Amino acid sequence: MDSLLSNLIRNEDSLALLLIFGGSALVAIVAILLTTMKNIALNRERETSRREIAAYIAEGSMTPEDGAKLISASPDKEA
């Protein structure tokens, strides 16, 4: 294993390819992680909003019809 790695490091073309593919893989992994974190945050906020609307309806300060309008007016396509 060490001889393979040292051969790759000694050969400049192989090192450039290793850096290109390694960098590309790193960018892809970071992009996937950031997208996942964004989706988690959006879903958490959406659920918080729904719970708050339900609490307003339960305490009587909002009608169920108004709550339904608020939830249906959300920009997400899943609601």
Image (tube, rainbow, N blue to C red):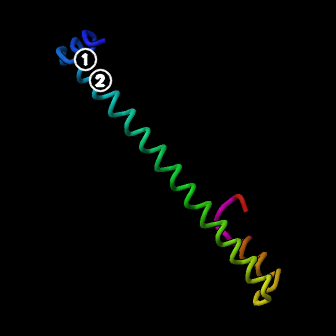
Q: Which residue is found at the position 27% from the left and 28% from the top?
A: 19
Asked if marks 2 and 1 touch (Cβ < 8 Å), the reply is yes
Q: Which residue is found at the position 67% from the left and 69% from the top?
A: 74
Residue lying furthest front? 2
| Residue 72, quarter of picture | bottom right
Reply above or below: 22 against 50. Answer: above
Q: In this view, does 11 lie to the left or right of 24?
A: left
Residue bounds of the magenta highlight: 72-77
Q: Which residue is found at the position 60% from the left and 67% from the top?
A: 45
Reply above or below: 36 against 8. Answer: below
Q: Does the magenta stretch include residue 76?
A: yes
Residue lying furthest top? 3
The percent coordinates of residue 31 (x first, y second) are: 44, 45
The percent coordinates of residue 32 (x first, y second) are: 48, 43
Reply above or below: 71 against 23. Answer: below
Residue kind at label 2, given as amino acid type? Leu
Q: Which residue is found at the position 65% from the left and 62% from the top?
A: 76
Q: In this view, does 71 lie to the left or right of 65?
A: left
Residue labelled with disc 2: 18
Q: Which mark is residue 25?
A: none
Mark 2 secondary-structure assignment:
helix
Residue labelled with disc 1: 14
Closer to us: 72 or 18: 18
Residue kind at label 1, given as amino acid type? Ser
